[in-house]
Image (spheres, rainbow, N blue to C red):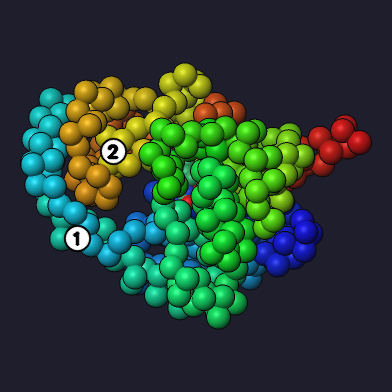
Amino acid sequence: MSSLFLERLGVTQPLVLAPMSGASTPALVAAVSSAGGLGSHGAGYLAPQAILDDAAKIRALTDRPFALNLFVLPDDFHEDEPAIDFARATLDTLMEREGLAIRSSLPERWAPRFSDQFAALCEARPAVASFTFNLLTPAQLRELKRRGITVVGTATSVAEARAWAELGADAVSLQGAEAGGHRGTFLHEPEEAMIGLFALLPLAARAVDIPLIAGGGIMDGRGMLAAELLGATVSQLGTAFLACPESSAAQAWKQDLAQADDVRITTIRSFSGRAARGLRNHYVEAMKPYEARLPAYPVMNALTAPLRRAAAAAGRGDLISEWCGQAATLSRPMPAAALVTTLLQEYAQARHRLA
Ligand SMILES: Cc1cc2nc3c(=O)[nH]c(=O)nc-3n(C[C@H](O)[C@H](O)[C@H](O)COP(=O)(O)O)c2cc1C
């Protein structure tokens, strides 16, 4: 099944660059795809035209297959006005205290319309489309398949893996609790589905018979082999690529990864209104007491956008969302193509040692 699936993905190596909204760029995606892995572009925050533009940019840089990834969301969102007012007042106080000249504002839309993003993705026709935050509808899945697009769904539990398999996805991307970025959980409360990859992989391998893509805390070739031994067909690495020059993570964020000790990496709701794993920095500490009163995703995400932009421009890593997985200090800042080569060498050596 493994080699057939890799063939289907059009890749020669068992390595997927995780989609990383806020950090992935066409250059990063193309570099990984050109080096034999599958580059994925996190398009969850992008407007439909930007999805089409980025797909064209990737195609201009590589003729290898790549993946586009979206957040499955409703087209319209609940607006909890008291929570919005509270969040704005809290953010404004924080920004004033921290000496940032910007203040919160109400955006035109809280997030791009998912149905428009989905239509753009279909038009862009990547080899692979991956999804997180929820299931697709059967009609959406059929539409992707009609266009010959391989469909991958994200799961953080056995039940979610089963749900994607029953829907007809081609593969499941398992997101262990170690993983950086937003939790993809959709059938449970996020804190209930914090299952480590070492437990989740063999459990899911027993429950579903479609290929498994393993993500969460994998930073080198040894980790890739370990995931394979536990039932994965391919490893998906995100944090390992954050410090690459092709990643658009803010400079301060890239630098802070080196000091992101395991105990400083936590789940955070205060940046976006949805649980996500990242560095416990000054913003996270300051907003912790208010987390329960803040609006849900994507409203909170839109409200913190001006602050995050201003803080990044001012080099204030302590005020931005520094998403990363639990093994972030193992990251190696080097060009993405060199990192792919290093990972694949380590993977081959680990296989050899085991044999
Ligand atoms: C900065 C960042 C952004 C992310 N954005 C997305 C995203 O847009 N879509 C998605 O499915 N997963 C996203 N993830 C989660 C990854 O797909 C993956 O689960 C995770 O990176 C794997 O764990 P690792 O970071 O320890 O390698 C993101 C992760 C990071 C670190």
Q: Judging from the image, what secondary structure is the residue with disc 1 in? A: loop
36 over 176 or under it: above or below: below
Q: Amino acid at mark 2?
A: Phe
- In the orientation shown, which residue stands out farthest toward the bottom? 146
* Residue 353 falls left or right of residue 280: right
Quarter of the picture holding the N terminus: bottom right
- Tell me: is circle 2 under 8 Å from ligand 1: no
Dot placed on the residue nearer the N-terminal end, 2 or 1 = 1
Expressed as whole percent of the image width and height from the top left, the position of residue 297 reads 28, 47
Q: Which mark is residue 230?
A: none
Residue lying at 47% horizontally and 71% vertically, measured from the top left: 138
| Foreground residue among 181 and 74 | 74
Residue lying at 84% horizontally and 38% vertically, measured from the top left: 351
Expressed as whole percent of the image width and height from the top left, the position of residue 179 reads 51, 37
Q: Which mark is residue 271?
A: 2
Q: Judging from the image, what secondary structure is the residue with disc 2 in? A: loop
Residue lying at 29% horizontally and 27% vertically, measured from the top left: 284
Q: Which mark is residue 109?
A: 1
Mark 2 in CB contact with mark 1 (< 8 angstroms) = no
Expressed as whole percent of the image width and height from the top left, the position of residue 5 reads 72, 62
* Residue 207 falls left or right of residue 247: right
